[in-house]
Structures are given as C-alpha cells and as structure tokens.
Amino acid sequence: MGLFRRVARARLAGRVIRRLRHAGVPDARYHPAGFEIRCTLPGDGEPTILPLTPLLGRSRSELGEYLAGVLRTGNLPQDWAQAAPLLRPVLRGGAPGAPLRRAAMPFLSEFVVVDHPDTITYVTPAQLAVWNVTADRVFETARGNLPGAVLHGAPADRPVVVRFVDDGNAYWTSHLLLPGWLDRLSGQVGGRPVAFAPERGTLLVTADGSSLLPALFAQVEEIYAKSSRSLTPMAYVSDPDGCTVPYPAPPGHPLHHLVSRAGRILAVEEYNRQAAELPGAAELRLAGSDEEGWRTQALWTSDAPVLLPAADEVVTPERVLPWDELDLTPVDDLSPERWRARGWPD
C-alpha cells in the first residue's frame, strides 16, 4: 500500500475516532491492519468492530449520520429471541478482547458476532449468562443463519475458478465452517473443490488437479499480503466427514512446496500479530526456498525468559537450533500456542 493511501486512511480513522470519543466512546482505537476501529459502545461490555471501508469517500455530514446510526444500534440485544437471528459465525485468526471462540483450523478460530447494519459486535462468554444459553447453541444458531447457498448451472467442462465476493452480508468465508458445504460445489468446479480465503470478503474455489491450481497459490498470496483484512493464504478441502481442513500435500506431492510455504506464511503472520500484544513473546520469520524447502525460525534475541512460537528452528545471536533440541514448557490459554524457555541452552 502506498504512502499517500496509508495517510488518507489514517486521517479518516482519526476523524472517526474523534467523533466517537466526543460521543462518549473513550476507548476507540484504530487498527490499520484490518482498516477498522475497535471500541466498546455505551452500554456494551463487548468489543465492537467498525469497518472503515464503507466510509471511504463519504462527506462529513454522511460520516456523522453513519456514526449516529452506529451509536443507536450498536448495543447487544439482551433477549435471546432478539439476538438469535442476528448471530453470524466468522473465521478469524485473532479478535479483540476475549470473545467466545473455538478452534476451527490451524491458526484460525470460529467466533460469533452480532451483525448490525454498520458494525459487528463479538459475543463474549459473559453474554451466555445474559441470554441463558450454552456456547454450543450460540455457535450452532450462528451457523444456521448462513444462507448455505450453492451455485446453480451446468457442471464445468474446463478449468474454472469460482470467486465469491462478499457484499457485507453473505459471510462467504464463514461458509467454510459448515460441514459438507464445500463438497457441494464439486459440480460447478468440475472436481474435488479446493478453497482459498485470502481475505475476509473473498472466497476462491477451483478443482483439485486443475491446471489453474498452482498459479492460484501465488495469486492468493498476493491478495493476502496486500489486503487490510487478510485471512489465510492456505488452501482447504473437505475431509471424509465434510469438515474443512488444510489441503494435504506431503513430501513428494507436486504442490508440497506451495502448500508448505502458505502454511508457514500464515503461522508467521498470526504469531507476529500475537507477539505485538504479548510481552515477552518472540517473533517468527520465514526462511528457505522452493528448492531447499520452507521453514520457520523463532527469533530469540536475548538471554532472558521468552515465549517461543512453534517453529522449525530457533535462532539465537550465536547459533541456529532445531526446535526438538530445546527443553520447553507449554504455556496455558494462548492461541496460537507458545512455549516458555528460561534461558539459552548451553
């Protein structure tokens, strides 16, 4: 993203934050990675996400009207009957605060949001007591609110890539959470569906074995790298139970290096996002090449206790150590997982 575009986006975020704080929302903060404002609206105990993309190009008066609507409708319904139709599942790496979550795929979790016209509010565990429902019911209700749409038409007779673009209401990438949904697209793509969700509003599906699949990895990586709402560069398929899982490509598979690189890029991004907010957390980097293979390296920069991410190797100022040579202790309640190391090994 160019400098002028970043500056323009930051200025828009600044105007929104000033208006929100003037309206009694003191914790409004800009998160440039997602091009969004995170805040807690008056009367809410849960974090709200305000996407800024819909505000691009709006006049000051339009901006004021938009934010007035946000402040009127942002509160979570206190009654389950009112809340249930508004719930949607979302697939994310990280989310603000401590929302309700459950593991979905490597480095990705399933969250539940209340879908307001202009914002989404993450549901937290505390809200379950207010609604007098279980977490399972909240998740299943949210999934049930997805349209579950499939494409109609003649099966593909040539390699195709089907592109689902979210208009803000479809939650296409969330459909990967529905058991069996991906397999239902096999007729339209002409084979076993392989899905990519490089950013929150884009879902790409092609057939396994398609001549388009190798090049699609590079296209998806570029979208993922450039998007302010990046999600995952990895490829996904359905397992025998219909659950979405990472595309399997063991050593010797023609796509092994592409799949390996995508998985490690996601690990680097999610671990470094976590490290930015977690004291004592080491960063992760990508190393290697298609020829020699891809690997991740945890950066242990000082001889002090550190929280290490899972990695192929650990780099200290003196040497590079294989992960399995370290004596580490797992840390509870962190996602993604980390391990505690006391000091550099002898």
Image (cartoon, rainbow, N blue to C red):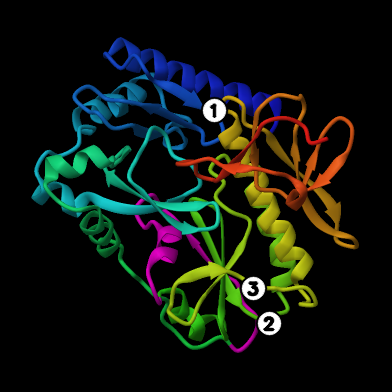
Which sits in the foreground, 322 or 78?
322
Residue 298 falls left or right of residue 317? left
- Tag 3 secondary structure: loop
- Tag 2 secondary structure: loop
- The residue at which mark 3 appears reads as 248
- The residue at which mark 1 appears reads as 277
Residue 136 seen in the current view: yes
Give me the C-alpha separation between circle 2 and circle 1: 41 Å
The disc placed on residue 209 is 2
Question: How many other residues sit within 10 Å of disc 2, few (<14), some (14-19) or many (≥20)?
Answer: some
| x, y percent for residue 262 | 69, 57
Q: Is the C terminus in the top left, top right, bottom left or bottom right quadrant?
A: top right
Which amino acid does the dot numbered 3 rest on?
Pro
Question: Is 175 contained in the magenta span?
Answer: yes
Which amino acid does the dot numbered 1 rest on?
Glu
Kindly check if marks 2 and 3 are in contact, taking CB atoms under 8 A apart as contact: no
Residue 78 falls left or right of residue 337? left
Question: Is 225 contained in the magenta span?
Answer: no
Residue at image x 26%, y 42%?
Answer: 125
Kindly check if marks 3 and 1 are in contact, taking CB atoms under 8 A apart as contact: no
Dividing the picture into quarters, in which one does residue 150 lie? bottom left
